[in-house]
Image: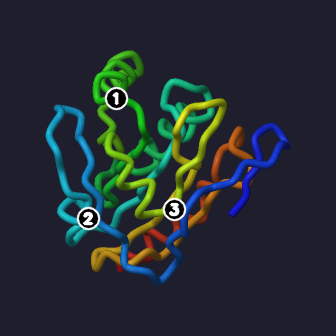
Amino acid sequence: MEIKVNGEPLVIEGKQVEVGDLAPNATLVNRIGETVQLKDLLADKVTILSVVPNILTRTCELQTKRLSDETKSGDIQYLTVSRNTPQEFNTWNQENELDVDTLTDESGEFGRAYGLDINLDGNDLLARTVYVIDQNGVIQYREIVEELTEEPTYKQPLQVAKDALK
């Protein structure tokens, strides 16, 4: 699959998961440095899984803040995944006075499992993506943002997540 960065083509490596697929498991590192299994975090919860290339960039910050704000009622679990380190995520949360659940794809296992690996200027990152995963672990919504520098759609995944709660 191909996306664009400032209009220039960029290839996403691997096979992307689709709506209707069971969300693949992956080993990730949480904010306190513990290794966790994604399947355990997703169990029995409707989840918006937000994937950002780098939390320290403006568009990723906007995406993370907006989805955090939209899910603050707590009915919908909100998780952010990136290749940022736990320390970078913790510093970002502190600086923004937020408490976003962040997960680091340190091993690259998540990127491979979801088919989201990109290489941007020599940096191994993840393509900007939003998933809605229902309480049974099935992907109900997926948006791989076509232009990496743009924000994702917000209204549609939030509505899909609300509908999944019913």
Question: Mark 3 = which residue?
Answer: 115
Q: Which mark is residue 42?
A: 2
Q: In which quarter of the image is the C terminus?
A: bottom left
Snapshot quadrant of residue 87: top left
In what quadrant of the picture does the N terminus appear? bottom right
Q: Hey, what amino acid is under mark 1?
A: Thr
Q: In which quarter of the image is residue 88?
A: top left
Question: Considering depth in this image, is 94 or 119 the residue closer to the camera?
Answer: 119
Mark 2 Cα-neighbour bin, 10 Å: few <14, some 14–19, many ≥20: many
Q: Which residue is drawn at 55% across and 63% down?
A: 14
- Circle nearer the N terminus (2, 3): 2
User: Where is residue 154, by image quadrant?
Assistant: bottom right
Distance from the alpha carbon under mark 2 to that under mark 3: 19 Å
Tell me which residue sits at (26%, 59%) in the image.
Answer: 38
Q: Does the residue at mark 2 contact the one at mark 1 (Cβ under 8 Å)? A: no
* Amino acid marked by disc 3: Gly
Q: Which is nearer the eye, 90 or 37? A: 37
Under circle 2, the secondary element is helix
Task: Give the distance between the C-alpha atoms of the residues marked 1 and 3, in whole angstroms.
Answer: 20 Å
- Residue positioned 75% across, 41% down in the render: 5
The residue that disc 1 covers is: 85
